[in-house]
Image (cartoon, helix red, strand yellow):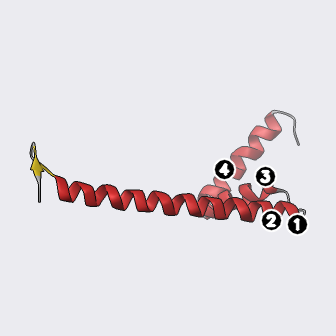
């Protein structure tokens, strides 16, 4: 292990290489997701709505319910209902 100024060079290199590999994987996954959205669009689905549904499904049911209630209040205040 090479130490330079108190930094373990081998350990640092390993950490950076792991991060780089994960960044490459993340990029590949992002491309895969874009392809799926493109496929959905080609099948006639509204991609904006699909993205919103994905976001909503990630949320806890309680948080989602609270957000929807606040959204309804805001929409009524703006005369949108």
Disc on res. 56: none
Query: Depth-wise, is mark 3 or mark 1 nearer the camera?
Result: 1
**Mark 3: secondary structure:** helix
Residue located beneath label 4 in the image: 67
- Of labels 2 and 3, earlier in sequence is 2
**Mark 2: secondary structure:** helix
Disc on res. 48: 3
Residue visible at 90% across and 62% down in the picture: 44
Q: Are marks 1 and 2 in contact (CB under 8 Å)?
A: yes
- The quadrant of the picture occupied by the N terminus is bottom left
Q: Is residue 78 above or below residue 81?
A: above
Q: Position of residue 49 (x, y in %)?
A: 79, 55
Give the spatial CA distance, label 4 vs label 2.
30 Å
Residue 50 lies in what quarter of the image?
bottom right
Give the spatial CA distance, label 3 vs label 4.
18 Å
Residue located beneath label 1 in the image: 43
Give the spatial CA distance, label 3 vs label 1.
14 Å
* Pick the front one: 58 or 33: 33
Give the spatial CA distance, label 1 vs label 2.
6 Å
Residue located beneath label 2 in the image: 39
* Pick the front one: 66 or 21: 21
* Mark 1: few/some/many CA within 10 Å (<14, 14-19, 20+): few
């Amino acid at each position: 292990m090479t130490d330079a100024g108190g930094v373990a060079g081998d350990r640092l290199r390993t950490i950076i290489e792991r991060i780089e590999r994960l960044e490459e994987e993340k990029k590949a996954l992002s491309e895969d997701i874009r392809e799926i959205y493109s496929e959905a669009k080609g099948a006639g689905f509204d991609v904006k709505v699909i993205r919103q549904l994905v976001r909503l499904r990630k949320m806890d049911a309680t948080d989602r319910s609270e957000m929807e209630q606040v959204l309804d209040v805001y929409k009524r205040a703006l005369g949108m209902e």
